[in-house]
Amino acid sequence: MNKKFAAMSALFAIAPLAANACATCGCSLSSDAATGYSSEAGWRIDLQYSYIDQSQLRTGTGAVSEPRVAAINDRGGSQEIEKNTTNHYLTAGVAYSPSAEWSVNLQLPYVIRDHSTYGSAGSDQLTSSNLSGSSFARLGDVRLIGSYQGLIPNENFGLQFGVKLPTGDYGGQNLATGAQVGRHPVYFASGPNAANGQTVDTSLQPGTGSTDLIVGAYYYRAVSQDFDAFVTARYQAAVFEALNQIDANYRPGNALTVSAGLRYENNPIWVPQLQINYTHKSTDQGALADITDSAGDVVYASPGLTLRLEQNLHVYSFIQLPLYSNLVGYQLFPRWTANAGISYAF
């Protein structure tokens, strides 16, 4: 196989971590490809950080201007007018490969999120007195990913199977009784929603309360002396939700992420690369879901650089720039996202 490309492996991909905050605003970077797929046996530990500031309200393929935002509910509508959601994701990973063909990766995310919203305000109510906010830092949903790349002799084609478990706090407000449902959900800390004792939207909680299955595949190869190419795809679908009462159920939408890119391997110390990342997310379902504002398609360009600090220690940094978005309903969207990681193999 191509030894240059097989530097090591980091995390599987972190798109689902960010998918809780909106339909497709989150990071879709393939961090496996960021550091290179590996066929070497042993252990790896990883730490990845992602920054996503959702500061622009969008619908369809364009941004919503301030006058349009102010007028959304002036004809008696009840559309929520969100102001901002800032996300910080720290994901620790431990991977073990007993052989060149098999590996397993455990990922533990920590979610830090600040959120503010005007609720269903009209043009004369978009003031600080009507702004509700929340802030939390909690563990998210754990994922366990297994990989197998022994299908072809070059070992440069792999399959991945995994599960996301409902380890993060989750829940919302029962529509019938108004009582808290779920496990330690986040409440608004300020503003009218805090005074009314309301929980933050279910999709903004640190966990989804669902058990999800994950399947994926990847392929990589050298395309010239200095360039390697890769393509990877992943599909995640909820198969069980803990919130299953009629007036208090929630199932996050299924998500498909496809990435392709090139790595420039001329220098063994630094490896620049470019990824193109596509994400499609279907509509969230259930009484606690924001059905009208939770689906869409997004394409990102993701330039980045990986550095080898020593033989088994690598760091990388990427920025994601949205090239295209087509969002269902009104959703907060980032103008850019940033990702950085460090990985050590032993």
Image: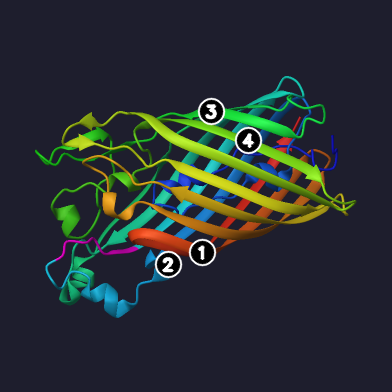
Q: In front: 295, or 305?
A: 295
- In space, the residues marked 3 and 4 are separated at their CA atoms by 12 Å
- In space, the residues marked 2 and 3 are separated at their CA atoms by 33 Å
Instruction: Say which amino acid is labelled 2.
Output: Thr
Q: Which callout, 3 or 1, points at the residue further toward the start of the chain? A: 3
Instruction: Say which amino acid is labelled 1.
Output: Tyr
| Whole-percent x, y for residue 169 in the image | 34, 36
Q: Which residue bears the numbered disc 3?
A: 162
Does the segment drawn in magenta span residue 180?
no
Q: CB under 8 Å between callouts 2 and 3?
A: no
Residue for point 40% across, 71% down: 63
Does the segment drawn in magenta span residue 78?
yes
**Depth-wise, is mark 3 or mark 1 nearer the camera?**
1
Q: Which residue bears the numbered disc 1?
A: 324
| Whole-percent x, y for residue 173 in the image | 19, 42
Under circle 2, the secondary element is loop
Q: Around disc 1, counting alpha carbons within 10 Å, would you say few (fewer than 14), some (14 to 19), or many (20 or more)?
A: some
**Relative to 2, is 330 on the left or the right?**
left
Q: Around disc 4, counting alpha carbons within 10 Å, would you say few (fewer than 14), some (14 to 19), or many (20 or more)?
A: some
**Depth-wise, is mark 3 or mark 4 nearer the camera?**
4
Instruction: Say which amino acid is labelled 3.
Output: Gly
Residues in magenta?
A: 77-83
Under circle 4, the secondary element is strand
Q: Which residue bears the numbered disc 4?
A: 217
**Depth-wise, is mark 2 or mark 3 nearer the camera?**
2
Q: Around disc 2, counting alpha carbons within 10 Å, would you say few (fewer than 14), some (14 to 19), or many (20 or more)?
A: some
- In space, the residues marked 3 and 1 are separated at their CA atoms by 29 Å
**Relative to 145, is 127 on the left or the right?**
left
Q: CB under 8 Å between callouts 3 and 1?
A: no
- In space, the residues marked 1 and 2 are separated at their CA atoms by 7 Å
Q: Which callout, 1 or 2, points at the residue further toward the start of the chain? A: 2
